[in-house]
Structures are given as C-alpha cells and as structure tokens.
Amino acid sequence: MDLFVKFWGTRGSIPTPGEHTSRYGGNTACIEIRQNDTLIICDAGSGIRELGEDLASRSGQAITGHLLLSHCHWDHIQGFPFFSPAYRSENRFLVHGRGPGDDRFYRFLSGQMASDYFPISFKALRADIRASDLSATDGFLGKVQVDYLTLEHPGGCLGYSFRLGSIKVVYMTDFELPFHGTAGCGMMRTIPSDLVKFVEGADLLIADGQYTDHEYLERRGWGHSSCFSTVDLAVAGGVKHLALFHHDPTRSDYDVDDLVDACRQRSSRHGSLLVVTGAREGVELRYTNSPVSG
C-alpha cells in the first residue's frame, strides 16, 4: 500500500506570486494526501485552486474527498471558492470536524461566501458538500488512520497524523513553540512532551518554520515557531524527514534556501540523521517502506 503526499500551497499568511517565489511557490496552505481512491485535502488556501484543476483533469470519474482544516484563518480557507470540483454535481466532499456536532469548519467555509465577502453564494456550489466528523468513521478515512492534536495558535489550530500500516505522516502548520532566547545553537530546546509523542517516528513531518530565532522573538504570541525550534521538535521525535512549511511571505526562494541550510546545520550539530527540506509546490512524495520522490 502506497501513500502519496503532494504540496499545492506552502506559503504562509498571504499569497506571494512572482519570480522571487517561483521555486517554493507563492500559494497558501494546501496539501493532498492520497491512498488509492481515498483523497484527503489538508487546508484550503489558494493552492486548492490548482489542486482542483488537476483533479478535474485526472479522469472523468466523480470525485469524493475529505477536507481537514487546521484552522479557519484566511490563508487556510481563501482558495475554497475557487475549487472547481465544488461546482460539479457529481462530486462529494466531507468537511470534517473533531466530533459529533462540530460543524465549525463547514460553517466558516460557507460563511466566507456570504455576499459581503464573495459574489457567488455557497448554495451555488453544486457538489454534495456536508459537515462530518472523524468519529463517524472511527478515525479512519479509507484505510488511513487519522489522529489530531490541538496546537498553540491564536484562535486554535489542529495538527493531524496520518497512518497507513507502518507509514506515518504528520501535518502541523501554524503552531508556536515558546523560545526565550536562552538556548544556544548547540543546545536542544525543551519541547512539550505531547508534541514529541505526536510526531514520534514520523516518516514525514510537515511543520511550521516561518521564523528565524530573531524574527520569533519580535513576534511572540503571533502563533508561529522559529524554524530552529521546529528542527529540535523533529529531532526529539526521531522524525525521518522534516519539510519546513508556511514560508514567510517576505522570504524569497533564496531566503528559504538559506533557512533550510541553517536548519540542516542545526540538525547535524545535534548528531541527527534528520533530512530537512523546504516544502515546495508541485513536489509529490510516495511512501511505502521508504519514501520515493515522484
């Protein structure tokens, strides 16, 4: 059994199109996770528009998908009104909450299409779009086991873990790991044990690395982490591959390159074999017993 992961949007806060972001991408958060006919979409930032076009071109078959939102800040839902499969009556999408009666994410997706914000009503979407929750399927979407964890972020945020047999992929965007400037370059930072346990042994961790240490210290409380704290989380959890995510909108491709290189150096100083990359639009990973880049 294979699990596929594809990046459709990797930028944080606001879309940043242009030559300076062409390699890592300028679309906001959207990840596709696929196992046979099971389609899971993490977040509906501007990257979901291109995902929708791609889904429509793959075959003439009806599309069924599961939408898992981390939270409802604008950069994580803004692409949904431009998701073309939502306008086709043969398609079906379930917007999952955490438990019975939790339709908050569904309400925010539909609410952003009120006439004050958008010219097309949610009712104009012809697909069967309805609220659901993970408990309705005992935490499984197809053969993929899904768990979640509440993260530290203004307004709240969820991280998700996806398991398929021995394969484990974790999606944790928009969370804050406190750092007070007291841990030097060679020192491991103290990471909450629940976070370490949640990412433990992951083949792939897609995680917030928006800030440098200096940037974080100027933006404490904004809900994002220093990339170096995220590296320490991955090392502490024995993660195999860390894909730094939610790239700051002010950062060019070359800036992200520098950030990734600095994170690799930090991992190496810890004596870790962790692979560190920057999440890039269009990259697809396939996981069986070991990841193969597609």
Image (spheres, helix red, strand yellow):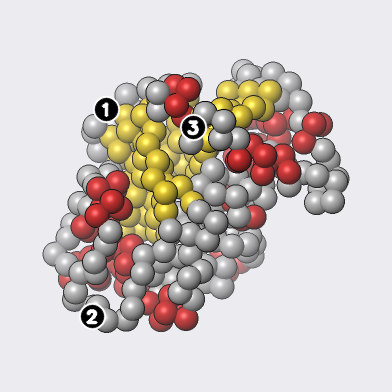
Q: Position of residue 285 (x, y in %)?
A: 38, 41
Which amino acid does the dot numbered 3 rest on? Gly
Residue at label 3? 99
Which of disc 1 and disc 2 is earlier in sequence? Answer: 1
Is 64 on the left or on the right of 183, as rendered? right
Q: Nearer the viewer, mark 3 or mark 2?
A: 3
Q: Quadrant of the N terminus?
A: top left
Q: Residues within 10 Å of mark 2 (few under 14, many from 20)?
A: few
Q: Where residue 220 appears, x then y in whole percent? A: 45, 74
* Mark nearer the N terminus (1 vs 3): 3
Which residue is labeled 2 in the image? 184
The residue to which callout 1 is attached is: 165
Q: Quadrant of the C terminus?
A: top left
- Compared to residue 75, the image places residue 110 above or below, namely above
Q: Earlier in the sequence, mark 3 or mark 2?
A: 3
Q: Which residue is at 47% across, 81% downward?
A: 218
Q: Comparing marks 1 and 3, which lies closer to the viewer?
A: 3
